[in-house]
Structures are given as structure tokens and as C-alpha cells.
Amino acid sequence: MRNSSLKSLAALALISASATPALAEPGLDLVGSWDSGVGAGTEVISVQKSSARAAVTNSETGSVTILDLSDPATPVSAGVFDLGLVSGEGVTSVAFHPKDDYFIVAIEIEGVFADGRVEIRSASTGAVLNTLTVGSEPDAVVIDREGEYAVVSNEGESFALDPETGEFFSPPGSVTVIDLDDGPEDATTMHIVLPDATGTPGMVNASDPGRTSDERLLERAVDLNGDGEIADEFEDGVGGYDWNNNGVIEDLDFVAGTIDGVDVMGNEESGELVLIPLLDNSPRFLEPELAAFTKDGEHALVVLQENNGVAVIDVEDGEFLGYYGLGTTTHDADIIEDDFVEFVEDALYALREPDGISVTPDGRYFVTADEGDTDLKASKTDMPHFPTAGGRTVSVFDAATGMLLGDTGNQIDYLANEAGVYPDGRSDSKGSEPENLVTFWYDDVQYAAVGLERADAVALVSLADPANPTVVDVAPVNGGVDLGDFAPEGIGYLKSHRSLYVYAANEGSGVVSVFEMTRSWHHHGRGWHRPKGRGHRHAFGR
């Protein structure tokens, strides 16, 4: 840890040598972990700060674990609740009520137009207190800070093929508002189908003649042969989809069907995984993901990742209010997968396509983790007309207007490279992939902690200057050892009387990593030294 006795002695030496010592920006120290013992699937974590507990989903076992965080660095299981899911069902999200002894868990059900459900369960016994119907494929559930409302983002991302017409179709994206004011047993719902967002400035568009939303594609698994199953991706001679029935799985492209007359392409080696062209921002293409409440709890901000936008919902009246288009980012980047990391000037021009969203504690800003999800790889030759997928940034917006204030440019990938965890194999496709984030106060400054799915790390971002968010640390979720399969997905935090702790739920490993916020002394703003990366040329470009 940085606050070691040796560093304390070094700090005292600096104090004696200078009249103006100062605290450095804080960093993240890996201080503990909790292992589910399952090996994968630990995906979403929700912390109830009032009781120092957390609810954690496991998508592999269909369960929710309650963690006791009374010792914040050493989570302990306080109960594992099997949700009793049947074939075709899956747990996607969980939200711990901020005050009361219950959590809400989201469950998707097999079938393209099948309604999902949420279950409200006791956090002490796991008993079901209520079951409510929501929209197709609920992806996330969040509760406002007072515990009066919850919102469920119903992604509805699946597509199906009409065997008679050869046309692909998908359910509309929607949001379900849950009124919790009368208690979990008497909770009620309001369902909102999101309206057409085509033409919204800053979102994807298909305004150019002959183009389909900048040629943006959605990678989706579809039952092409009508057998009720999805043929696996081709691996080691097993799986794939024999489209032409010649008994051989080969690298063969084929037209799987159409959507509005546009071809949908597949490949035998990819099984029944097809590439759906994102034609517009009509309801069938709107796919709500994560969400956050405004500070007053009156509005919910719902991310539309593939569409590069945010929907604003009035939760009391259950009404849609409007869209914010999130625009593009241009900055220095390494966009070539070549085992050599070089940040070339203005190499990346991209739609943000965020996954995670958080409203800052002061309520003035919303902050996004710009992962990217559509299938459009980075290419210098495409500039400046066709933005690629994923900003690889954390972006800050005015919560009242949706106006962009600033983003982190290339800082996340740059410092991931400095820390030895930059995924060069993802250079042409979304880089470190900022996935989800939380925001909080620490010593009178607001920060964001951001999970980096492909870098197996957590980034710490200072929001002291919202127009210039600054990455102050990138910390590997496993201390920089045996990385590659952790994939941090969910993230949460807890303030104790001693410190502040950040929790990363690692979907690939089934482990929750625990970081403590710490500071080190530095002299005249120089900070601690990080080892240089290879071939970097433009540090912290915007």
C-alpha cells in the first residue's frame, strides 16, 4: 500500500525540505477480495451503505449473494439465495434498497417478445415479497437514493426471423417504473415504450443517401433454422451453422434474411450469430441498458448504448420527456493490433456509446463510461465521416441540459498501458472498454471509479474540473498478475469511518475485488512515477 511506513518517512523528509508539501491525487490500492467459488458469473454488485451490505448476482448459478461489508476490505457471505430459475431464464441485475431489508432482482425470460419480471426479495431470508411484470429482456434495475422509485431498463435486444417472409424483427425498447412508496408488497408499475428517436442530434443516424446509420451493425444470436436453439460459434470443429447443408462448416458468408429490404449477413463459422444493420432509432432498435436517478429522484436517465443517447424519464408520472444525443469524441489513440502500443494523433473518431451512467453526488452532472457496442472498428481512413464504435472515455455532461462538458480523451488507455494492462488485441475495437462506473465525494472532490472490462482494471477519475476530467490511477483488479479473464462488470463503493472502498464484480472470474482509496505525499505536484509504456507518442491527448 502507498501509505506504508517507508513512504511516511519519505513524506516527513519532504516536509523538512519544503515549506509547501501537498497531498497527491488519490489512488486505488487492492486490499482484498471475495471469491464466489463458482469461477464466473459475478456480474452486478449493489451496495446498501446504511447496513454495510452488498447484493451480488451470479449469472452462472442464477443466484444472489448478500455480502457483509462490516470489515470493508474483507467481504463475507451472509447468505446465498437461489432464485429457482427455469430453463431459458437468466438473472441480469440487482438493486439493494438504500434503507430497507430487501433487494430487487431482474430476470429475463426466453422468447423474443416475452415479458421479463422483477422479484422483490428479503435480504435476510431471500423470501419473495412481490413479483412484477416488466418489459422484454430487462437489463438493469436501479433504485433512487430515497428508495421511493425503481426503474428497469428493458433492453429488448433480441431479433427473430420470420421463416415465411425472411424478415427480421425485434421488440421495442422500454422502461418500467416501479413505485415503492407503499412498501415492497404493494409496489406498482408503469410501463413506457420509448418513442422513435430517429433524427435526434448526437445519436446514430442514417441521413446519408444509401447508408445505414454509418454502416453500424448489431451482433445478435438468432434461431435461423427454427429448431428452438442457437448454434454455437465454431470452436475446435464443434458448432457453427451449416447454412448450405453441405456437411462442412467453413468461412462462408451468407444472407440470413433482410430487415426493411437490407441484407442481414451471417457466417457459417459464427453459427447463428448474425450482423443486423442498425437502420434508425425507431423503437425496435432502441435498447435501454443502465440507468441513474437525478439527485432529486424525480427523473431517471436511461442509457441507449447502441444509439449513442440517453432517455429522460419522469418517474412520478411515468412519462418520457426527451433524448440527449451524446455525440462524438476525437483524440489520440492506439488503433492498430500489432503488439506495439503507439498513441497516434487524433487517430480515434468515435461515437461514445456508453454502457454505465452515474449522476454525481452534487446532482450537477451525469457521467458516462463510453464502452462501445456496435460492430464498427476503428480506421484512420474512415475519418472524418464515419465515427467508429466506442469513445474509450469517461464523459461529463450537464445533468440539467445534457450538454457535453468534457471527456478523458486517451487517458484511460494511456494509463492502462503505463500500468501494463492495456489490451493491444482490442486496439481496433473499443480498447480498454470502460464498462460501468460510480461517482462519490472523497476529501471534498468528486471522483468516478470505472471498471475497464478488457483491461481487467479499475480507473479512478477526478471530476474536480468537469470540463477536464482527469484519470489519476488505473489499478489492476488482480494486482497485475494472471490478468485476462476477470472482466470487471459491476462496480460499487462504501464509505467507512476510516476510508472509502471500491468494489469491482468480475464476471469472468467470479471474484469481487476490493480497492481502498489512498493518498501519497508529493513535492510541488510531481506525483509518484509510473513506468513508461512502449512507443507512446502523445500523452493525454484530447
Image (cartoon, rainbow, N blue to C red):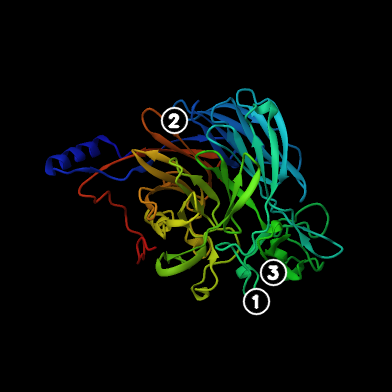
In the image, residue 211 lies at what x, y percent?
Answer: 64, 73
The kind of residue on which mark 3 rests is Asp
User: Residue 84, can we see it?
Assistant: no
Residue wearing tag 3 = 251
Q: Is 128 located above or below residue 235 in the figure?
A: above
In the image, residue 307 lies at what x, y percent?
Answer: 61, 59
Q: Residue furthest top?
A: 125
The kind of residue on which mark 2 rests is Pro
Quarter in which the C terminus is drawn:
bottom left
Number of marks present in the image shown: 3
Marks 1,2: beta carbons within 8 A: no
The answer to whether residue 438 is left or right of residue 5 is right
Nearer-N-terminus badge (3/2):
2
Mark 1 surroundings: few (<14), some (14-19) or many (≥20) residues within 10 A: few
Residue at horizontal 34%, vertical 39%? 444
In the image, residue 47 lies at what x, y percent?
Answer: 52, 33
CA separation, marks 1 and 2?
A: 56 Å
Q: Which mark is residue 166?
A: none
The answer to whether residue 328 is left or right of residue 276 is left
Q: Nearer the viewer, residue 502 or 170?
A: 170
Nearer-N-terminus badge (1/2):
2
Mark 3 surroundings: few (<14), some (14-19) or many (≥20) residues within 10 A: few
Q: Callout 3: helix, strand or loop? A: loop
Q: Callout 2: helix, strand or loop? A: loop
Q: Is 1 located above or below residue 542 in the figure?
A: above
Q: Nearer the viewer, residue 500 or 59?
A: 500
Nearer-N-terminus badge (1/3):
1
Q: Nearer the viewer, residue 73 or 322?
A: 322
Q: Which mark is residue 72?
A: 2
Marks 1,3: beta carbons within 8 A: no
Q: Nearer the viewer, residue 420 or 255?
A: 255
Residue wearing tag 1 = 209
